[in-house]
Image: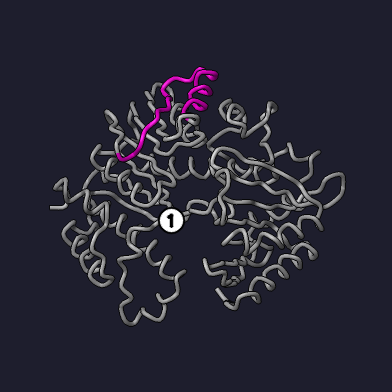
Amino acid sequence: MTGADETTDAPLEHFLGLLQDSLAGDTFIKLVLAGPRNAEHGLQRVSVRRIALKGQPQLSFVSTHATRDITKNLDLPAAQAWLRGQVGVAFSHAHLRTRSEEIQLLTSKKGRHRLSRATTPPDAADAADAADAADTHHDAAARPPAHDRAKQRLIAQDRPFLTALGVTDAQHQVVPAMSRKWKQINKFVEVFSHALAASPLAQAERIRVVDFGSGKGYLTFAVHDHLSSVPGRQVQVTGVELRPDMVSLCNAAVAKLGLRGLAFEQGDVRTYAPDALDVMIALHACDTATDHAIHLGLRAGAAIILCSPCCHKELRPQLLSPHPLRPILQHGVHLGQQAEMLTDGLRSMLLEACGYETQVFEFVSLEHTQKNKMILAVKRARPVANAQPPDTVLAQIRDIKGFYGIRDQCLETLLRADGRLG
């Protein structure tokens, strides 16, 4: 990252100027506003794309809430006026993507702004995204973007569950406001498919999946659809969700579609006790809820564990700022990033110590979701020659904890209570 500013107003004005220049120069691709100061009605973020209505340029705003998306379109002067009152004021994080740059504005609780810029020459997918953002209008919006049409996807666009959940319309075309979710669904199924092929479940005739925090069920339905595509395979996919309205909504869709082997239940990862499971999924489980989900998967002997962690509050107050890192970690944003890296790094190491091949990677880009990291763990079917012995991994964990002054880490505590770490 380059070009950081941190006075109160200069970075904000600089960001707004860059935003205006990108719109005027036709280099704008997308803007995401996240971290709302007042998360009214479950507001999570606002995504902004450029569209054309009846030949006139406008900006389309998609407000993502906990249970719904709301779309509104504004002409450019009105849109820019609205953004000036929101960026850096009502939202603590603004992420602008242009054809040549990723530009971020972070706002602290005290109202101080920090601007960072990174040059990112667009690849073919970015160029297609830019064309899609510039060319979309209501007459053409029903057509999937050009790169979506050309790309081979594991979930067919005409699958009935997509229409039932509002991702596609009656003609099986992606609803414009759901294009982000459509990409996320396909990326998740792609990751899941590769994990399945590398796991002991590759040739299994029966697969049981539990998806914690299933929400509206987009990914739960997609996993069920993908697994059910193999003739003769018995599939049982269960979505577990705290909100009863979401459970009812998803079960109604299951009944309407006449699906077998798919059900939704109300429950919490800390107390839910499945009879058995082969795949444990937990996306956006907050803070130590991710540790409880991983622990549940380990206790059940899951062959695949898929997590996209959300919030990393447990370690941050424990962290020391050991020399020579003290000058770096004195900045709150760096301390938060360090806590996130350490939390997920320790989780992956603990999974390795328990006999899993583990990867930590970017799931989808920040334009699609605030939390974009995924932990993927696949149980080793047999000993791996170059795998580190559990004792070596645990010794490394002790060294890391000692260096940073970490006293407690939830997953390790749960595993030691079980006697799984010796």
Q: How is the image coloured?
A: one colour
Instruction: Tell me if residue 82 is in the magenta stretch.
Output: no
- Look at the image and give the residue range highlighted in magenta: 247-270
Towards the viewer: 363 or 48: 48
Judge left or right: residue 354 versus residue 227. left
Q: Is residue 206 above or below residue 135?
A: above
Element marked by disc 1: strand
Q: Residue at x 40, y 33 (%)?
A: 240
Judge left or right: residue 24 versus residue 284. right
Q: Residue at x 12, y 53 (%)?
A: 422
Q: Is residue 47 above or below residue 107?
A: above
What is the three-letter code of the residue carrying label 1?
Answer: Phe
Residue 252 percent across, percent down from the top left: 52, 22
Residue 226 percent across, percent down from the top left: 47, 32
Towards the viewer: 246 or 199: 246
Q: Residue at x 40, y 46 (%)?
A: 285
For disc 1, the marked residue is 361
Q: Quadrant of residue 176?
A: top right
